[in-house]
Amino acid sequence: MRHLAACILLTLLLVGCAAPADPDKAQESIQVIAMDTAMLITTYGERSSAAAYAAEDVIRDLEKQLSRTKEDSVVSQLNAAGRRMLVEGDLIPLLSSSGWFYELTSGAFDITVAPVVSAWGFTTDSFQVPSQEELHELLKLVDGSEVSVTPAYDDGEGTKATVRLGPGQSIDLGAIAKGYAANKVLEVFREYGLPRAKAELGGNVLVLGDRPDETPWRVGIQDPKRPDDPNGFIGVLELTDSFAVTSGGYQRYFEENGKRYHHIIDPSTGYPADSGLTSVTVVADCEMENGTMCDALSTALFIMGEEKALDFWRSGGVPDSNFELVLVTEDGRVLITEGLADRFVRDESSGYSYETIS
Ligand code: AMP
Ligand code: MG
């Protein structure tokens, strides 16, 4: 009897070894609270756990470097130093990208908007409406063209560069850091050879491959009018190997005297952008730099408004890169650029009207 049991066990073990491993049997899902956001990382494959925790490490490391509210971050040190500082690490490529998107969006995307964001209380959560005079003074500091970075060099201990800010300037990477983090998370997923994965870093979503049932990942687009309804979608994007990044006034705001003030600041006025758009989603393929592009653009196009945003899209606003858009307007329209039309499932019961843009 014992002999029989041993035989059965041995057979089971051998069968177990011979059968190909099902990569989807190994799955990990972790929540990471970082960068002021509840993030969710879901990974598949034999190395799913290691990959998810490696992605968390990457995000935490970036937060340490880039947070404006952590006193010892490189960004806080640079903001405190004011004019000139030798920096290393991820801040260097991020500053180069920020400069690039400042130029491309004619200043709608501008990391030197930092003091204005602070004046509204979005850095500390002690919200207030600044006076016109205060905004007038602070806007003198907002000019992305004054930020410069010397070419990076390697001194044997890492990549370094010297950053210069204009007098009194400070920077806020809140509109681009999570997109950059998504790029790095993609790098981790690839390094670990994952067949499929999803990372939701607040409004920044990255999907790798397709879902275990071999259908596309489904990324819901929140109805800006129903920000607190977890199922309040205006539609769903069906995506594989993509970044999808949404910026919306509904994501962070406060109310005073019955008026709503949100966190996306128009650098030309110092006020929350009032462009007629309530959300902008930018979608692009999973190429390495595209996370950053989608994040920077979602913020900038929100500020630019419908007409300028669509012109930007039509004119191929980012050289050598493709992206598609879903715009939601205050007056109840959803505009989907044609490259996404067959990947966007409308929710006809949402009360919005839908248009495909070519
Ligand atoms: P996002 O959610 O990516 O659209 O980024 C919004 C965040 O970016 C805000 O909370 C601010 O920290 C920062 N921000 C606000 N306005 C701008 C702007 N015009 N350019 C760059 N960053 C901005
Ligand atoms: Mg952004």
Image (cartoon, grey):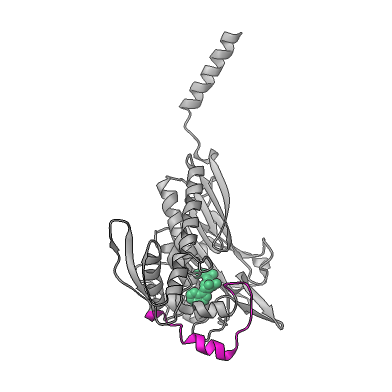
Q: Is residue 114 inside the magenta stretch?
A: no
Q: Quadrant of residue 160?
A: bottom left
Could you say where residue 352 lies in the image, as x and y percent from the top left?
64, 72
The N terminus lies in quadrant:
top right
Residue 127 in the figure: left or right of residue 200: right
Could you say where residue 242 lies in the image, as x and y percent from the top left?
47, 58
Q: Quadrant of residue 246?
A: bottom right
Q: Is residue 316 visible?
A: no
**Magenta span covers which residues?**
122-146
**Rendered view: 208 above or below 26:** below
Q: Residue at x 43, y 67 (%)?
A: 293
Q: Is residue 293 visible?
A: yes
Q: Nearer the viewer, residue 86 or 172?
A: 86
Q: Nearer the viewer, residue 86 or 231?
A: 86
Could you say where residue 156 lies in the image, as x and y percent from the top left?
28, 56
Q: Is residue 124 inside the magenta stretch?
A: yes
**Rendered view: 76 above or below 64:** below
Q: Residue at x 51, y 48 (%)?
A: 53
Could you say where residue 51 lies in the image, as x and y percent from the top left?
48, 46
Residue 193 in the figure: left or right of residue 272: left
